[in-house]
Amino acid sequence: MNDAPRIATDPALLPAHVLAREIAARRLSPVDVVDALLARVARLEPKLQAFVAVYGADARLAAEGADKAIRSGHAVGPLHGVPVALKDLIELEGRITTGGSAMWRERRSTVTATIARRMIAQGMIVLGKTHTVEFAYGGWGTNQHMGTPWNPWDAVRARTPGGSSSGSGVAVAARLAPWAIGTDTGGSVRLPASFCGLTGLKVTIGRIPTTGILPLSTTFDTPGPIARDVEDAALLYNVLQGPDPLDPNTRGVAPVDPIPVLRRGVRGLRLARMPEAERAGCDPETLAAYDGSLALLAELGAEIVEIRLPFLLGDFVGAQAVTAAEAYFFDRELVDDPAAQLDEAVRPRVLAGAGVSAQDYLATMRHQAQAKQVMAQAMAGVDALLTPTTPTPAVRLDEVDQMVFPSRFTRFGNFLEMCALSLPNGFSAGGLPLSLQICCPGFEEATALRIGWALQQASDHHLRLPPMVA
């Protein structure tokens, strides 16, 4: 090893951008980072169940290789040696990818997802695959047969981790991984970020390629980072974004680096509060935290404004017709088989797609085009629309109603092809994280990250540790 002073803090507790800096400066070895994370996995994973598979031996080998490359002056990028966890929809050639289904426990990938290739090319180390709701179709984060990850914010009662990227949220919150990849079709990056006290970025369709990611709904699917803070989310987003010749949605979408604007603050930005009617049905503590975020942004120099919308943000349940129809297209062989061992909550959601007619599908797509135009007009001259991410903090698993979706404030972003950032903005009296959503017009991820970064510089909600970690 080199003679540079070693960092004393447990590497597992450091955010990814600090890990990257310390590794690049040779004050911290990737081997020490991986060993610290794997030790936490060994200790906490039996209860948390964040991972479907942990690649311990291979991660250590990759860390040793990264250490030698960095020490010899052959680092391939600023994130060389930084570990990451992948949602179990993301293909890695030769590895099992279950998509959250017990029926695919032996399904071995023959390709590697574009985003995985990009991370590996940067020298990042894949720790393993994280749990997901079956077929990624559910917002609470439950999985009847593969297991539901334990939200680390309550050490006693099992609570919703948020879905469908449930394992990614739990792994990052419990400091089993510095950051992770999720996918978001109606909120599946933002919901676990909300319930687990994390920062999650839902990108615009076309920003990040979906090649090699098991689909739920190709109309709405978007991969994205789940991280501990905005800076980490911006760094990982930068690695993931960019055109892919295998993904037609990304053609002509030039990458935009958010880092140069991250620290510009919010002075002069016009930010819209949600219409008053949207407050109905929200938990009082969620609303108090939301109002506090608006007040803080105003103190930081943003102008808080009103917008008029002819619809409620939760009205876009019609998007389920498209999601169900496309999910049925991809997974019909399994859901049509009564002998297949499928999640009792997920099977009827997918089967509903069999009843979506061409007329229903096209009517929904026409409605989408009209609603996008209405929202664009309402947002003219406005930089972002602010809402809670979820109406309540994480609920107990034994209180979950599978007929109700927690995506009231998230699914409109997918339907209207917007981008959005979710970040913690307070805690309930019981110590559960609350969350703010910053929703921006399509391809304005840098603006959402800029607003979120300003908030996190003026608050410390994102620094608080879950009781299972502290």
Image (spheres, grey):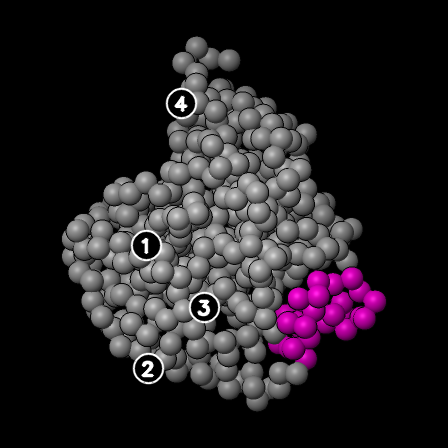
**Quadrant position of residue 24:** top left
Q: Position of residue 237 (x, y in %)?
A: 43, 49
Depth check: give the residue in front, 223 or 295.
295
Residue that badge 4 annotates: 25
**In this picture, which residue range is highlighted in magenta?**
325-354
Residue that badge 2 annotates: 310
Q: Residues within 10 Å of mark 2 (few under 14, many from 20)?
A: few
Q: Position of residue 290 (x, y in %)?
A: 31, 57
Label 3: state its secondary structure: loop
Residue under the point 56% across and 51% down? 159
What whole-number distance in Å separates the C-alpha atoms at marks 1 and 4?
39 Å
Majority secondary structure of magenta residues: helix
Asked whether the residues under the numbered discs 1 and 3 touch, taking CB atoms below 8 Å apart as contact, a structural biologist would say no
Residue that badge 1 annotates: 289
Label 2: state its secondary structure: loop
What whole-number distance in Å separates the C-alpha atoms at marks 1 and 3?
17 Å
Q: Position of residue 128 (x, y in %)?
A: 63, 40
Q: Earlier in the sequence, mark 1 or mark 4?
A: 4
Residue under the point 53% across and 36% down? 468
Label 4: state its secondary structure: loop
Residue that badge 3 annotates: 408
What whole-number distance in Å separates the C-alpha atoms at marks 1 and 2?
26 Å
What amino acid type should be assigned to the residue bearing mark 4?
Ala
Residue under the point 50% across and 76% down? 317
What whole-number distance in Å separates the C-alpha atoms at marks 2 and 4?
54 Å
